[in-house]
Amino acid sequence: MEPVDRDGRTEREWLEQYRPGEYERPSVAADMAVFTVTSAETDNYRKLPEKELRLLLIRRGGHPFLGKWALPGGFVRPDETAEQAAARELREETGVSDVYLEQLGTFTEVGRDPRAWVMSCSYMALIDSARVQVQAGDDAEEAAWFKVGYRLLREQKEQLDEGCVKTWTCELKLRTEEEELTAVVERTVTAKPTSTSVVHSIASNDGLAFDHAKIIACAIERLREQTNGTDIALNLMPGRFTLTELQQVYEVILGKELLKAAFRRKVADLVTETDHYADHAGHRPSRLFRRNWEGV
Amino acid sequence: MEPVDRDGRTEREWLEQYRPGEYERPSVAADMAVFTVTSAETDNYRKLPEKELRLLLIRRGGHPFLGKWALPGGFVRPDETAEQAAARELREETGVSDVYLEQLGTFTEVGRDPRAWVMSCSYMALIDSARVQVQAGDDAEEAAWFKVGYRLLREQKEQLDEGCVKTWTCELKLRTEEEELTAVVERTVTAKPTSTSVVHSIASNDGLAFDHAKIIACAIERLREQTNGTDIALNLMPGRFTLTELQQVYEVILGKELLKAAFRRKVADLVTETDHYADHAGHRPSRLFRRNWEGV
DNA sequence: GCAAAAGTGTTTGACGTACACCCATGG
DNA sequence: CCATGGGTGTACGTCAAACACTTTTGC
């Protein structure tokens, strides 16, 4: 019944004699772009605090890229999936578990790590800022939440005889009180008669380790795509929130202002109203909503 | 100027003394779901031939999964990216290069390969069927193009006290003249107050090796998403084609019929008309179109 | 002539954009 | 009272769905 191979062995027999070959293998790291939304201070007693999109980075304490900032992450172990590795690292780094985690892609550029052959299986994580208190600095490791800015610098199109090359150039700015990191990343789409290909590249990079500028850019683009069209942004919210708070989160992710009435119609199916109200200051109290579990 | 670490070494000095640690590393395979669209025979002299979505599979000639069908692929080498490895394997397998290639994700389930620790960095490839003539069977390897069927079997929602679990069950059917493979895959979304997670699993599987049923399901879902909203499906078309042919390709990917007038308006910006006509049989000749390079 | 497909127009409803307006609060 | 935000209604434009209709070919 059981199939046997050319040497007459069943699968079990074959597995017992199997020894992995000695060809070269890469290390695989699970790296994460961890986002949260924080509130700035407010000056006026009437005004609401502004929201800020923030990304967690770790300052490297050793070579390579000593002193540069990198995404949190670590190597995947044989007894866990890459996603479990990411969740483990996130717990070690921030103390938070049970968060939204989504695979972005795997970055395998040759020479992306000067030490050795290392691939990065990258994830995006979204956390309600209330859940993360202290950034549990491991030993000499320094962690910081950087304010995120991401904007289109240039959009360029070049016509070929049979095809077309289109390039988007975006500027990534990451800021804390002390630090400001700037990187410029490009997305190039080459359309030819037989195929289309997309290439991401780093045009300039000041202060970020490895190819992490590229990974962060992919994360922001994915976050924006998903924010339109899914309820993913609700993973950044606390259990109860006002619609204006939610709108501020959308605005800070998408990098543009939205109209109140339209926004409320758009998210109507994603949230459910509660009987509670936020007792603000200076204006009419606003109803608190919670996530709606029906929403697709 | 150059930063030095605790031991007073610059990055170059550090790299010279660096030796990779001896922790365990995984093998990384680049696997591909290669799609094409073929035409069936037509009986009636008036009727157009029906289109069929097809997927390339390789019958395994050795353990493990001896005799089962698997996605084409191979191990990534240290001097190439995973995408280059996929392109190389595709060239070796089908003789075709310069095709549309898109990363689907990396599958890292523990125990997905009974031999050893192997991750699969998976890609989707789209080829115009006219470009692939013979499936260059390597040695004893058998390759075949399977007709693809993918349909929703059940959609289930379970309400929790604080959250919701939703499960989609889909049936994957792959057919040649001789073979029929059936697999059932599930996508489970668990929404809790703090986070949302998505899990894919294989409920049943007859004839497919490894976790490839899951990878194929992800590929089909990605292909469907991308077909709505991008011009990705044009990578399956020859240089010149009629709008009805293009519509048939959309229909066979999406698994549903589309209205002609609406379809033509939808793809109007993606194609450009040429001065050529297809001389058919039994009805009015139709204008040939080509891909439009402006289309975003 | 007629079956099959090529190709176009019109109506309808959903949805997003934009703007206008009234309500409630604390200082 | 008034600045600020909470909350809702209405008009307009775009786009996809649905259907109807005319045109052109080979046998």
Image: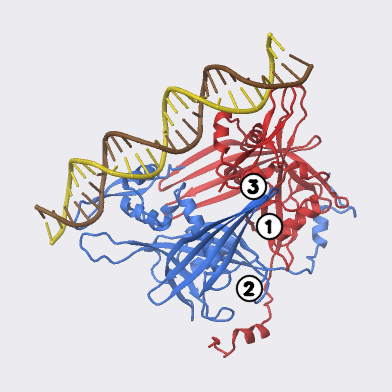
Chain colours: A red, B blue, C brown, D yellow
Question: Which numbered circle lies on residue A120?
Answer: 1
Q: Which residue is mark 2?
A: B113
Q: Foreground mark, 1 or 3? A: 3
For label 3, the SS is: helix
For label 1, the SS is: strand
Residue at (75% x, 42% y) in the render: A129
Label 3 Cα crowd, 10 Å radius (few <14 / some 14-19 / many 20+): many
Q: Which residue is mark 3?
A: A219
Q: Quadrant of residue A38?
A: top right
Residue at (58% x, 47% y) in the render: A294
Q: Is residue A73 above or below residue A280?
A: below
For label 2, the SS is: loop
Chain identifier of the residue bearing label 3 in the image: A
Question: Which numbered circle lies on residue A244?
Answer: none
Q: Amino acid at mark 2?
A: Asp
Question: Earlier along the polypeptide chain: callout 1 or callout 3?
Answer: 1
Q: Amino acid at mark 3?
A: Ala
Q: Position of residue D20 (x, y in %)?
A: 24, 41
Q: Position of residue A277 (x, y in %)?
A: 70, 32
Foreground: A101 or B51? A101
Circle 2/circle 1 CB separation < 8 Å: no
